Image (cartoon, grey):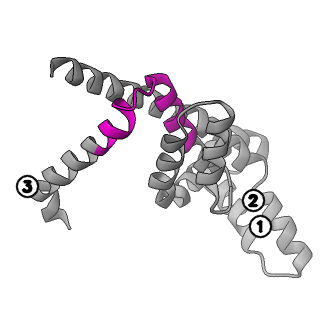
Amino acid sequence: MLKIFGSKKWENIKEQFYNILKKQIVEAKAKPYTVALGCAIGIGGNFIPTFGLGFIVAFFIAWLFRVNRACAAGVSLLTGPFVPIMYALNFVVGGLFLTPEAGDMSVIEFIVDQYTKLLHVGDIQDKILGFLALFGSSFMLGAAVNTVIFGTGVYFLAMRIMKRFETSENKE
């Protein structure tokens, strides 16, 4: 697998990817900010629990705000495999804000306590309450913060890529 990254095959894959992007976005005369906002919505939607429908939610939100829907859904699908990491990051960030309220617990203990509530063996009522506690305040606070931070980062990254395409198009 690692051998592909240093080979001509990898360079060809990258070139094909850039050509597809160029045809779908730059040559379609999409405004850079609509593409960048679509990308930001795509990654931001994966920090919120959408139960596997994040790309549809991202597409709908992009349609609502009249930004690039294809980029929103595409980025959501591309970053979909990282959702477990994103959710864990939500707990860490939310825990950083809420741990001082938890008293003597460290951030790690707080996060372990959150997962323990979900995995608690008991009747169905305990399971439901554990699930609600898991996706409670620490998770959602972390999701909000991470959505803003990563969405902003992806927005500026997409803008930079779009400007790069525009300058390369002007040279031709």
Pick the quarter of the image with the C terminus: top left
Q: Position of residue 38 (x, y in %)?
A: 53, 35
Mark 2 / mark 1, whichever is N-terminal: 1
Question: Which amino acid does the dot numbered 2 rest on?
Answer: Leu
Report which quarter residue 67 is drawn in. Answer: top right
Mark 2 / mark 3, whichever is N-terminal: 3
Residue 82 higher or lower than 144, as above or below: below
| Residue 103 visible, this angle | no
Q: Which residues are magenta?
A: 20-42
Q: Position of residue 130 (x, y in %)?
A: 81, 66
Task: Identify the disc placed on residue 117.
Answer: 1
Question: Which amino acid does the dot numbered 1 rest on?
Answer: Lys
Question: Who's the residue at 22% across and 17% down the image?
Answer: 170
Residue 57 higher or lower than 126, as above or below: above
Q: Distance from label 1 to label 3 (Cα)?
A: 50 Å
Q: Which residue is mark 3?
A: 8
